[in-house]
Amino acid sequence: MSLRGHGFVVLWSGLMPGYEREFDSWHTIEHMPERLGVPGFLRGRRYMRASSTSAHAMFILYEGAHSDTFRSPGLLARLNDPSEWTKRVQAGLTGFVRGPCRKLISLGDGVGGAIITLRLTRASGESETAHALLKAVPNIAQLHGVTSVHVGQHVPDRSFVETAETKLRPSDATSDFSFVVLVEGIGVSQLEQALPQAVAAVTDASPGPCEAGVYVLAYALDVAG
């Protein structure tokens, strides 16, 4: 299914042992509904690590009206008023990576049961890289089991303001990436087979560091109405 809106935010994180059950409950019952209550948020998804190919325990995707949705006054108000449950869970996050993105392309139908995330870092030549990544999308979309492919360009927040919630996150939090490619598929085994070809396609388009992982869909929620 094509991503809704014109922007999305991607989040990866590790999770300290002992926080798994509380994180699952918190994110399903409180956190995702809270986020989708912020104007401009359209859909949320939570994925969990499928295998050792994933460096982080979880991947979270929020689709929004535009990339500025993820630095809007409505979201900042929530970030500055975290619940007691949020405060408890944030202490268990490790290796936190977050970044809003401008949607460059979103190709495909339906929602796959698993996803490949490809996080790319490139210091210069971003317009050329964007063009090359867009050219690579049709080939990735034809890999067996792939249902959709999405490409986003990270929009760094030059006016970042620390909030009550961000202060709770670990000191190793980062947003050091330039592009993200998301490849949805019918299952984990199909995407693990497609992973080497998907990595090759994006690294041909964007030589440099590429962090890749395969995750299985755990929960998805659309905004009411």
Image: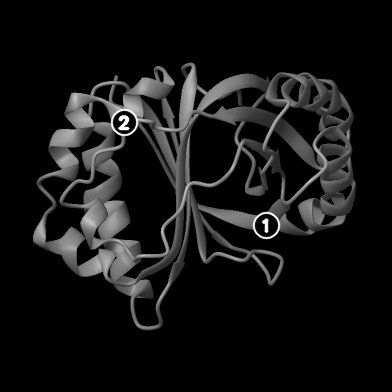
Does label 2 or label 1 sit earlier along the sequence?
A: 2
- Dot 2 falls on a residue whose secondary structure is loop
The numbered mark at residue 159 is: 2
For the N terminus, give its image quadrant: top right
Which is more toward the observer, 160 or 44? 160
Which is more toward the observer, 173 or 115? 173
Quarter of the view holding residue 153: top right
- Residue behind mark 1: 213
Q: Position of residue 33 (x, y in %)?
A: 25, 41
Looking at the rendered structure, the kind of residue marked 1 is Gly
Residue drawn at x 78%, y 18% as measured from the top left: 131
Above or below residue 4? Residue 80 is: below
Quarter of the view holding residue 92: bottom left
Q: Residue furthest front?
A: 124
Q: Position of residue 103 (x, y in %)?
A: 57, 22
Above or below residue 75? Residue 46 is: below
- Number of numbered markers: 2
Q: Position of residue 137 (x, y in %)?
A: 80, 27
Q: Position of residue 133 (x, y in %)?
A: 78, 27
Residue drawn at x 46%, y 53% as measured from the top left: 174
Which is more toward the observer, 52 or 224? 52
Residue drawn at x 31%, y 37% as measured from the top left: 160
Above or below residue 28? Residue 222 is: above
Looking at the rendered structure, the kind of residue marked 2 is Ser
Quarter of the view holding residue 179: top right
Please state which of the two labelled residues, at mark 2 or mark 1, is closer to the viewer.
2
Q: Is residue 75 left or right of residue 189?
A: left
Q: Residues within 10 Å of mark 1 (few under 14, many from 20)?
A: many
